[in-house]
Image (cartoon, grey):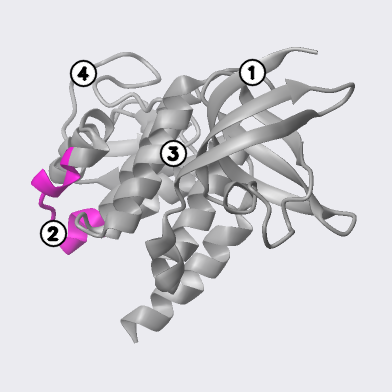
Amino acid sequence: MGITKTQGIVLKYTNLGEADKILTILTRSKGKIKAIAKGCRKPRSSLLAASEVFAFSEMVLYKGTNLYHVTQAETRETFYNLRKDLLRLSYAVFFVEMADTVSDEEIPSERLFLLLSKALFYLAEGEIPIGLISQAYQLKLMDISGYRPNLSRCVHCGSDDFESYKFDVELGGLICGQCEKSGKNVIRISAGTLETVKLLLNTEISRLNTIKIDNTIFNEIDKLVKKFVETHLEKQFKSLEFLDEIKNNYQE
């Protein structure tokens, strides 16, 4: 049986028996895997912290007949601060649900692993606006998943001549005035929104606090990103519905 040493982030788990869990883990070298953590629910278990959702750990795994088994785990980060704030916790749940959705069993994606780990770190740290982290995370995740939006030319004809800017959600990019009639799901955006989306795509999450945007642009991007994600991932995220409720309560 092969032994693997890797970093991993727990996306979710299912309790098994009286003391075990089946973990869904996004690993740095193996992609998404399912692994049994024996006895991790016991108070004195060495796997207790590493088997919680969001836990970032150095893991030793071996591959059984059907599942991996976690034999050792040294937890590097639990992102404890996320659990002290319901809004941040809700965003974190949404982030891991998205990562779970786009990742495949045992298909490595170091870019996705690093994106999720950085997003959780800066979300917990609290020095970068939550909304910017969320928008950047979603756009970067879509890029990694093969859905990078086309923001330079018309996705229908290839023209770079625009009198105004409109984004075709289904085609995944800008659409010019000549081709707009062929688009069924088109959102008008400002030049400022277009430039900010480019910035979010190309700026490291650690440097997002260098980006300043007004509420109008922020709301335009929120609308665009939500429709873009839902259309191309073909999924209604339960965590996003709950997050929207939480945000409404914070605004009241």
Q: Position of residue 181 (x, y in %)?
A: 42, 34
| Labels 4, 1: front one | 1
Name the N-terminal-most of marks 4 and 1.
Answer: 1
Side (left or right) of 143 relative to 39: left
Q: Which mark is residue 160?
A: 4
Residues in magenta, as a range:
207-221
Image vertical order of residue 144 relative to residue 236, above or below: above
Q: Residue furthest front?
A: 44
- Asked where in the image residue 150 lies, by quadrant, the reply is top left
Q: Are marks 2 and 1 in contact (CB under 8 Å)?
A: no
Q: Which residue is mark 1?
A: 4
Q: Residue at x 70, y 34 (%)?
A: 70
- Disc 4 packing (10 Å; few <14; some 14–19; many ≥20): some
Measure how far apart labels 4 and 3 are at the Cα level: 33 Å
Quarter of the figure that contains the N terminus: top right
Name the N-terminal-most of marks 4 and 3.
Answer: 3
Q: Which residue is mark 2?
A: 214
Name the N-terminal-most of marks 3 and 1.
Answer: 1
Q: Amino acid at mark 3?
A: Leu
Q: Residue at x 57, y 60 (%)?
A: 239
Image vertical order of residue 85 relative to residue 82, above or below: below
- Disc 2 packing (10 Å; few <14; some 14–19; many ≥20): few
Q: Which residue is mark 3?
A: 116
| Residue 214 among those drawn in magenta | yes
Q: Are marks 3 and 2 in contact (CB under 8 Å)?
A: no
Identify which residue, 169 or 159, lies in the foreground. 169
